[in-house]
Image: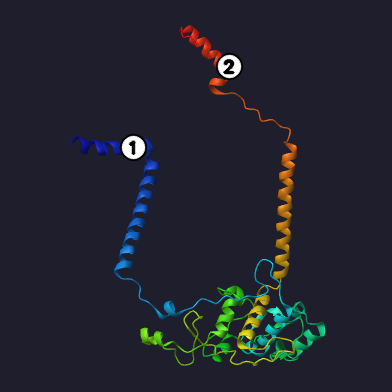
């Protein structure tokens, strides 16, 4: 009986020492922690009693295969010949559906094209640039010039969806930054079209690829609206002296080109980072040598404290003498 009375009294005394503000804060914290702990327990029990059902996307989705490019790594540099081949693949294959609105024709100078070549590319581009008829004020189109950004193949989103089974082709300017895996994802997606595996249809009979879609295990939900864009060797004709235009080579080249469109200043960033790293290493070495030089003659002095302090020793001796204790 005494214990039953003592416990509430001890708790009341504890909260009295804390004060009412801290007591309320403590109780609120305990209540919040209790709710979180209870939620954790309930969630864990529910998970083990009713585990989530397996899905075709979870079991058959594949991560992008590694892709070796000259631009990879902290010291990576662009291969301009490869970028030109990638641009050719974009121009002859991808540009029919995908825009590249954040890149201007004049940016192609960085790939090694001359001013005349850039002007010719802009002038001969399949899609004309949007404009306004100065006489009527009505929307019109004109031949592109070097300062124009690459025009979209569709007038608007509605037209784009109407021409692609209600799917909206993404802009490719920043696609290697917007997708996990970057260029590896682009390459894997372009080369990953295949028939649905029999195991998938056996385990998930309702997951058959719908009409108008195409099975690709590298796409998030396995079925993509884009038909295989690269279907055969030689689909794009490379200039003499370049690698053979196999599907794998064309996919690699266009992936490298899209790395450049997403980060055209990559080489400058790598060079700047290397210079900063060298500066920091040299600065650290100089700072250490300066420290050693400045403090080379300094002697570490330890001030006696506590029982070893002469003042304390004298006090202790006097106190011991008064008490009749011999040290």
**Residue 92: x %, y % from top left:** 67, 90
**Residue 292: x %, y % from top left:** 72, 40
Q: Quadrant of the N terminus?
A: top left
Of labels 1 and 2, earlier in sequence is 1
Name the quadrant containing residue 308: top right
Residue shown at the point (55%, 82%) measured from the top left: 189
Query: Which numbered dot is residue 311?
Result: 2
Which colour assignment does the render follow?
Answer: rainbow
**Residue 207: x %, y % from top left:** 40, 86
Mark 1 Cα-neighbour bin, 10 Å: few <14, some 14–19, many ≥20: few
The residue identified by callout 1 is 14
Q: Real-space Cα distance between discs 1 and 2?
A: 44 Å
Task: Confirm whether residue 154 shows in the render.
Answer: no
Judged from the image, the secondary structure of the residue bearing numbered disc 1 is helix
Residue shown at the point (53%, 20%) measured from the top left: 307
Residue shown at the point (48%, 9%) measured from the top left: 326
**Residue 170: x %, y % from top left:** 58, 82
- Tell me: 10 left or right of 224: left
Judged from the image, the secondary structure of the residue bearing numbered disc 2 is helix
- Tell me: 128 left or right of 307: right
Task: Confirm whether residue 71 shows in the render.
Answer: yes
């Amino acid at each position: 009986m005494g214990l039953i009375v003592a416990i509430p009294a001890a708790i009341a005394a504890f909260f009295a020492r804390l004060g009412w503000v801290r007591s309320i804060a403590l109780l609120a914290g305990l209540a919040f922690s209790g709710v979180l702990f209870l939620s954790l327990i309930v969630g864990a029990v529910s998970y083990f009693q009713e585990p989530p059902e397996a899905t075709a996307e979870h079991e058959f989705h594949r991560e992008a295969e590694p892709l070796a490019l000259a631009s990879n790594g902290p010291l990576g540099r662009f291969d301009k010949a490869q970028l030109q081949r990638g641009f050719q693949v974009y121009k002859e294959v991808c540009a029919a559906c995908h825009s590249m609105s954040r890149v201007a024709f004049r940016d192609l100078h960085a790939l090694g094209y001359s001013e005349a070549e850039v002007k010719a590319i802009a002038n001969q581009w399949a899609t004309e640039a949007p404009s306004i008829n100065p006489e009527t004020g009505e929307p019109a189109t004109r031949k592109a010039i070097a300062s124009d950004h690459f025009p979209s193949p569709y007038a608007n989103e509605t037209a784009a969806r109407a021409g692609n089974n209600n799917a909206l082709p993404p802009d490719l300017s920043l696609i290697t930054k917007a997708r996990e895996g970057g260029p590896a994802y682009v390459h894997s997606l372009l080369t990953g079209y295949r028939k649905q595996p029999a195991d998938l249809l056996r385990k998930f009979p309702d997951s058959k690829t719908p009409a108008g879609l195409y099975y690709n295990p590298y796409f998030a939900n396995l079925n993509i609206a884009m038909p295989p864009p690269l279907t055969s060797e030689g689909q794009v004709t490379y200039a003499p002296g370049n690698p053979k235009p196999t599907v794998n080579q064309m996919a690699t080249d266009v992936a490298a080109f899209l790395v450049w469109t997403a980060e055209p200043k990559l080489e400058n960033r790598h060079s700047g980072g290397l210079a900063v790293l060298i500066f920091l290493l040299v600065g650290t070495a100089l700072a250490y040598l300066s420290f050693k030089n400045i403090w080379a003659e300094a002697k570490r002095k330890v001030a006696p404290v506590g029982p070893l302090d002469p003042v304390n020793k004298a006090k202790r001796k006097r106190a011991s003498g008064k008490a009749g204790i011999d040290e």
